[in-house]
Image: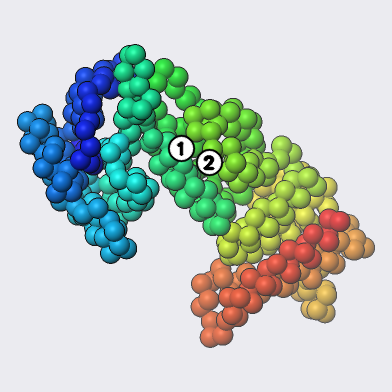
Amino acid sequence: MKLLSFIGFGDYKETTYLYGDKAVRTEYIQEALTKIFHPSEVIIFATKEAYQKHGENLKKRLKNVHFVHIETPKTQDDIWDLFERIVDSVDYGDEIILDITHAFRHIPFMSFLVMLYLQEVKNVKIRGIYYGAFEAKTEKGAPIFDLSGLLDLADWLYGVRDLRKYGRGEGIYTSIRNMNARFYKTNTQKKPKTLSGYANLILLLLKNLQLNQIPTFMKLSAEAKNGYEEFKAEAIEFLPPIRYTLNEIKRLTEFGCNEFGKECLEKQLKIIEYLLEKGMTANALELMREWIVNTVIFLAGEKDWLRREVRIKAERTIGWFSADIIGKSEGFEKTEWAEKLERDEKMTKLAKVWLKVQEIRNTIAHAGMKKENPDPNKIERKAREFLEMLKEVLS
């Protein structure tokens, strides 16, 4: 593990640095952090003046310490030069502690962005960001503030963005798990109890959505609703700014249904809308087809909607209605449900959409293996039109 730090050319006064139940008396925050966290290497960024004033003393105090010469940034090019020097000091897969106690003016802000960059580009693990608050010292000493939660928040925002735009849960899952692990590694007395389990649930829920396993998705959505308030309270307690970004997770708790019926069909329409919103048009079209089958089952008064024989009967029923619309019902089996629902206007509406959905859905289901295929933008536009037509059936 590496400790990255900065040193200025000020006169640093001796104090007792406090972190949890640990106390280190020194004028150098780098020495305090080294004795608390035991990094294998210390890299200190210093100007020529700062090195001349503190370099030799720090070499005597610290083992395996290396200095990287920097200039006080005066131009835009200087800022990028410092950026590259920090990046170059880190190897792929390194574990890092960052100390910003003596970083000059805008450098703490830039260092934070460098950490985000290193996580993505060099797969670096950030184990902590710390600030030795000499100005906040009391009779006992000066506290060392753990600013790692800001990094957790950045990871969380990445995850929220992916969930909001694309309906993907990997980022949220990783963020929650990292946040949970960080609290268990610190000296805080209170630990989160539900974050990790809820992260697993969200990831599983969204994987089922991506694979279009809708009954399982709806079941997990109901489970997520039952545990949401407890998760929300704990998430806010351990990372307060999260409270303003929880709406997307709450949406995932609104798709569950306990019993097959009209409410369940309405929830499935909302799922179709969600899929279209997140760009999962193929999934939406597949679900539209199955939704029509589900609605035939509902109109026929059948409850066992997932039984294979029931679904086959519903497909044959809607097949007859669709063939009848285009005048080709001869040769199609007119099921007892077709007889029962023949005068139901909803069946006529369903059959019209069935014909439209089947055409585009088949193109997608067979990976476009035909000579001519519709434009993707047209497919998306048509899918939204089909959704509105389906909504009319239940209105």
Marks 1 and 2 close (CB-CB < 8 Å): yes
Amino acid carrying mark 1 in the image: Ile
What residue is shown with label 2? 202
The answer to whether residue 62 is left or right of residue 282 is left
Compute the Cα span from label 1 to label 2: 10 Å
Tell which residue pokes out farthest to the right in this image.
343
Q: Residue at x 32, y 63 (%)?
A: 76
What residue is shown with label 1? 176
Horizontal and vertical percent for residue 148?
38, 36
The answer to whether residue 237 is left or right of residue 316 is left
Q: Residue at x 52, y 53 (%)?
A: 161
Horizontal and vertical percent for residue 287?
65, 58
The answer to whether residue 110 is left or right of residue 229 is left
- Which numbered disc, 1 or 2, marks the residue that appears first in the sequence? 1
Which residue is at the front of the view, 200 or 186?
186
Res. 75 image quadrant: bottom left
Amino acid carrying mark 2 in the image: Ile
